Amino acid sequence: VNADKINQCHTDEKIKKIVNESGIINADGASVVLASKFLGTPVPERVAGIDLMQCLLELSNKKGYSVYFFGAKEEVLQDMLKVFKRDYPNLIVIGHRNGYFSEEDEQAIQEDIREKNPDFVFIGITSPKKEYIIQKFMDSGVNSVFM
C-alpha cells in the first residue's frame, strides 16, 4: 500500500475489505513507513512494487515459474515483453493481455488466466479497478499470485 491506497481505504469500504484480506501487503512508499513508526507499529522497510516485481521475475526466470502480464497499452505491453525476454531469457510467459477491455471482456480474460494457470499474474491497471478485478478473479477460482 501507499498513501493513496490508505486514503482510498477510508472512503471505499470495498477497497478496505480487499486490502485487509490480502495475503501480503507491502509498504510501497516512504510515507507509509514513516506513518507506521509514528503510530507505534513500525514496518521493517519500504518495498516498492516494481522492486518486488523484479525479484519475482528473477525468481521465476531461475525456478521456471510461469507468468501472465495483464494491463497497459498494447504497444507498451509488447515493448515490455521484449525487454523481459532479453533480461529474463528463461522466463515462461504463458499469456498477456492489454489493459483496455469492456465489462463483457472480463469473463474471457478471466477464463484465459484460469485455463493457463500462471504462477504469477502481474497487473498494470489503475486503482481501484485493479483491486476489483483481482478480487473478482480470485472469487471465481483463479489460483494465481496476483500483483
Image: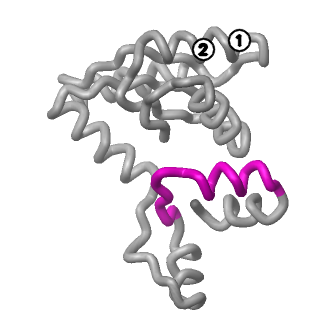
Q: Secondary structure at mark 2?
A: helix
Q: Residue at x 72, y 37 (%)?
A: 129
Inspect the magenta stretch and tell me whether residue 27 lies in it: yes
In this rendering, the answer to whether 47 lies above or below 138 is: below
Q: Residue at x 34, y 19 (%)?
A: 93
Q: Quadrant of residue 1?
A: bottom right
| Mark 1 surroundings: few (<14), some (14-19) or many (≥20) residues within 10 A | few
Inspect the magenta stretch and tell me whether residue 83 lies in it: no
The boundaries of the magenta stretch are 12-28
Give yes or no for contact between labels 1 and 2 (Cβ–Cβ under 8 Å).
yes
Q: Secondary structure at mark 1?
A: helix
Q: Position of residue 113 (x, y in %)?
A: 50, 17
Residue 48 located left or right of residue 4? left
Amino acid beneath label 1: Asp
Residue lying at the far left of the rendered structure: 62
Residue identifier under label 1: 105
Find residue 109 and name its label.
2
Residue 88 located left or right of residue 54? left
In this rendering, the answer to whether 50 lies above or below 78 is: below
What sort of colour scheme is used for the picture? one colour
Residue 67 located left or right of residue 22? left
Q: CA distance from mark 1 to mark 2?
A: 6 Å
Q: Position of residue 128 (x, y in %)?
A: 72, 44
Q: Residue at x 69, y 45 (%)?
A: 127
Amino acid beneath label 2: Ile
Find residue 114 and name its label.
none
In this rendering, the answer to whether 100 lies above or below 55 is: above
